[in-house]
Amino acid sequence: MQVEYLYYLPDEFKASAVRLYLNALEEKLEPILGSGDRAQEVLASNIATENCLVAICNEKLVGIMGIQTNEGGFVNPSLKTMKRTYGILGGIIRMGGLAILHHKTRIDELYIDGVAVAHEMRCKGIGTRLFDLLERVGSKKGIRTISLEVIDTNPRAVALYEHLGFAAVKTQTLWPLTLVVKFPFRSATLMVKKIG
Ligand SMILES: CC(C)(COP(=O)(O)OP(=O)(O)OC[C@H]1O[C@@H](n2cnc3c(N)ncnc32)[C@H](O)[C@@H]1OP(=O)(O)O)[C@@H](O)C(=O)NCCC(=O)NCCS
């Protein structure tokens, strides 16, 4: 199995990246963006193709890791896009939902916006390789920490991150915000790995 890794998302893989990302991060994103075409549209027109690492196998996108620096993230919907897609009120409420998930990234930090590997390609080391590459990129840029947030319904991901050297530093309980945005999880834990 030959897997190629790239430091940006080529245009021809944009649509499949959006599908993979939405699918894998459904629990976080569907309560805010919905599940249909509108969510795909919002992402397709608001992803920063240079803020990610991707894995390609047999000319298919099989993995993606969105990266946020202090200058911006992988998924950056503007209020204008949200209002155009969901209407004025719907757009404002959904921007509020996205704000709940937002992480403020320091200058010496890389925050993983989301990581997803295609279902049939999981447990073959692709996710681990994406983490390795990110660490290498970070070290070259003088980054000191890599961080991510994991939800309480994803214990397998927590085990993987611990195995990769991440440690939990803070857990945020989303109640009572979950009364407004119907997230199917109760809390999100910030995990950090020191690399510098
Ligand atoms: C988490 C994920 C990116 C890991 O990618 P991967 O290529 O399967 O990872 P690797 O092959 O390097 O490592 C495999 C490990 O990931 C763990 N893992 C975490 N979530 C998993 C999932 N949903 N399915 C399969 N394995 C998962 C496995 O336990 C496995 O460990 P093991 O081999 O000791 O059993 C991938 O499984 C995935 O896309 N999951 C769904 C989306 C998700 O949960 N994203 C993280 C949000 S914080």
Image (tube, helix red, strand yellow):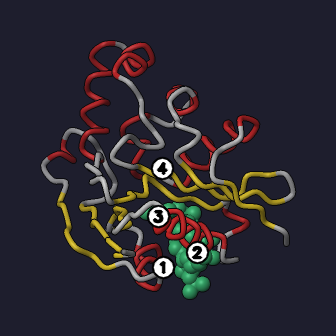
Rounded to the nearest whole Å, what is the CA distance between mark 4 and mark 1?
19 Å
Residue found 62% across the figure and 72% down from its top: 129
Asked if the residues shown at circle 1 and circle 2 are in contact, with their CB atoms under 8 angstroms apart, the answer is yes
What residue did someone put label 1 on? 160
Q: Is mark 2 within 8 Å of ligand 1?
A: yes
Q: Is residue 180 above or below residue 142?
A: above
Where's residue 131, x and y in %? 53, 70
In which quadrant is the C terminus drawn?
bottom left
Q: Is mark 1 within 8 Å of ligand 1?
A: yes
Where's residue 106, x and y in %? 27, 54
Residue found 84% across the figure and 51% down from its top: 59
What residue did someone put label 3 on? 138
In which quadrant is the N terminus drawn?
bottom right
Q: Is residue 18 above or below residue 153?
A: above
Where's residue 48, x and y in %? 53, 37
Q: Is mark 3 within 8 Å of ligand 1?
A: no
What residue did someone put label 4 on? 26
Mark 1 / mark 3, whichever is N-terminal: 3
Asked if the residues shown at circle 3 and circle 4 are in contact, with their CB atoms under 8 angstroms apart, the answer is no
**Callout 1 amino acid:** Leu
What residue did someone put label 2 on? 128
